[in-house]
Image (spheres, rainbow, N blue to C red):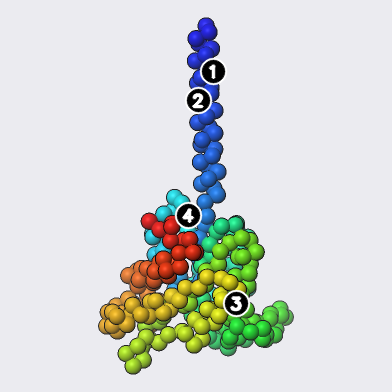
Amino acid sequence: MRKLNRSRLLLHGRGLFILAVLMSLAFTFSQKPALYIIGDSTVKNTNTSFMGWGTAMQTLFDTTRIEVRNHAMAGRSTRTFIKEGRWAAVSSQLKAGDYVMMQFGHNEGSHPDTTRGGYRGVLRGIGEETKELIWPDGTPETVHTYGWYIRQFIRDAQSRGAIPIVLSMIPRNSWKAGKVVRADQDFGLWAKQVAEQENAYFIDLNKITADRYEKMGPHRVKQLFPTDHTHTNAQGALINAESVMKGLKKQKQIGLHTFLK
């Protein structure tokens, strides 16, 4: 009888130990960091002919140690990503130790107004200039500069203990005198300037990929763009994702390189 009770106590003790281990593992799993990616169709694209680099990135990380959540949406600019509540949905989920990668610039170029063409446009630069709009239904909107919107993403992420990483926009398949047309005089430059002002990390994705395109040459690069000069196929998405990885490995202080497969 004593042996039976002792066996039961041992089994009970082992059961509690296993339960404690499982609970500890579950807690650790739930606390693993997350990488949130925001941007436009060059980051996430549901069209079967195209692929965004954010989608390709998901295959490069060890997802048992970090979650990768691509919240980019086709057709969005910095302005509309905030206006439509998409950034609020992301920022509400952020916790200390998470990462936020942001890449915008492809949809900001139009003059901001209440027309269909101007719905996505922002003011150029990084200053505090604004433009007041009144929509047909009477709704007011204050439009800011590209840099102002990037600054909001950075500050919101930092306020939640997350780590913001600003990326310059991927280059288009546009060439001039044998060189890829770069974004180093406008959106790419402004992204870098705001990142520096806000003590955020910056990866010059535009430069890294443009350098690679120029080594490949116009003919090979054209094969990465099925129908237009902006959206890449899966192979092009992987090249851009590899460019992001190159930037991460170059700045090891970010820490994301440790989660690569």
- Above or below residue 29? Residue 190 is below
Estimate how packed mark 2 is, as few (under 14), some (14 to 19) or many (20 or more) residues with alpha carbons within 10 Å.
Answer: few
At x 46%, y 61%, the residue is 256
**Type of amino acid at the residue the image marks with label 2:** Arg
| Total count of labels | 4
**Residue indicated by mark 2:** 14
Classify the position of the C terminus by image quarter: bottom left
In the visual, does 154 lie left or right of 232?
Answer: right
What separation in Å lies between label 4 and label 3 (alpha carbons)? 28 Å
Tag shown at residue 198: none
What separation in Å lies between label 3 and label 2 (alpha carbons)? 55 Å
At x 48%, y 55%, the residue is 67
Q: Are marks 4 and 2 in contact (CB under 8 Å)?
A: no
Residue 231 position, x and y percent, is: 40, 76
**Type of amino acid at the residue the image marks with label 4:** Ile
What separation in Å lies between label 2 and label 1 (alpha carbons)? 9 Å
Residue 142 position, x and y percent, is: 68, 81
Q: Secondary structure at mark 3?
A: helix
- Above or below residue 42? Residue 95 is above
Tag shown at residue 9: 1
**Residue indicated by mark 4:** 66
Q: Secondary structure at mark 1?
A: helix
Q: Secondary structure at mark 4?
A: loop
Which callout, 3 or 1, points at the residue further toward the start of the chain?
A: 1
Residue 76: in sight, yes or no? yes
**Residue indicated by mark 3:** 197
- Above or below residue 162? Residue 147 is below
Which callout, 2 or 1, points at the residue further toward the start of the chain?
A: 1
Which callout, 4 or 2, points at the residue further toward the start of the chain?
A: 2
What separation in Å lies between label 4 and label 2 (alpha carbons)? 31 Å
